[in-house]
Image: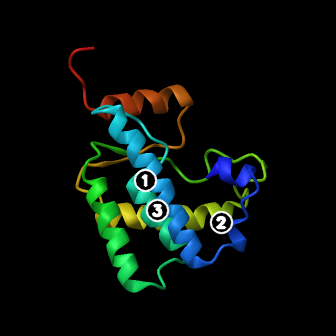
Amino acid sequence: MRKRIEGGLELHDLSNSDRRALLAELWEEQRELEQRAGSSFVVDRSSYDYIAFWLHYTLHDDVEGSDTWVERMRAAGETYDRVLLLPWGVFPLEADGVRSTNRWVQFHYQAILEATLNRFAHRGQVLKIPGEETLEQRVDFILRFLPVQSGG
């Protein structure tokens, strides 16, 4: 999305139908990268984020399309071993012209994502990262909960 926005894409100029198509295109690009990575990978966004984007950008006016989208993203989410949930407000975003630095816009998205994970992620799948610790402590926390891969 960042590349598209930096290239001049104006999300506010798109219709909901265009936004749905864009989100589907972004998901297909991500899913292809995930599949090429094999069994071990880390991505910045999970399929659950795509449900949250759908809701955040109010694309749910198409009820049947929303049912299909959510089920597709939920099923894809079942393939993840872990989903790391970063804490809200701990990592401030820079004013780069791409993401909003308004903490309440960020909170709105975070609240939708947390509700989505609560509803659709399987038990034990979501790892909530503490916000109070140092970066090193957070990394150590994460590594304790990631599945161990054999063979290297």
Q: Residue at image x 39%, y 65%? A: 116
Q: Residues within 10 Å of mark 1 (few under 14, many from 20)?
A: few
Q: Residues within 10 Å of mark 3 (few under 14, many from 20)?
A: some
Secondary structure of the residue carrying tag 3 is helix
Identify which residue, 100 or 18, lies in the foreground. Answer: 18
Residue to which mark 2 is pinned: 105
Direction from residue 43 to residue 132 in the image, left or right: right
Residue to which mark 1 is pinned: 28
Residue to which mark 3 is pinned: 24
Point out residue 115 in the picture as x, y percentages from the top left corner.
41, 67
Q: Residue at image x 66%, y 66%? A: 104
Q: Residue at image x 42%, y 27%? A: 140
Amino acid type, residue under disc 1 in the picture = Glu
Nearer to us of marks 3 and 2 is 3
Amino acid type, residue under disc 2 in the picture = Val
**Is residue 84 visible from the viewing direction of this image?**
no
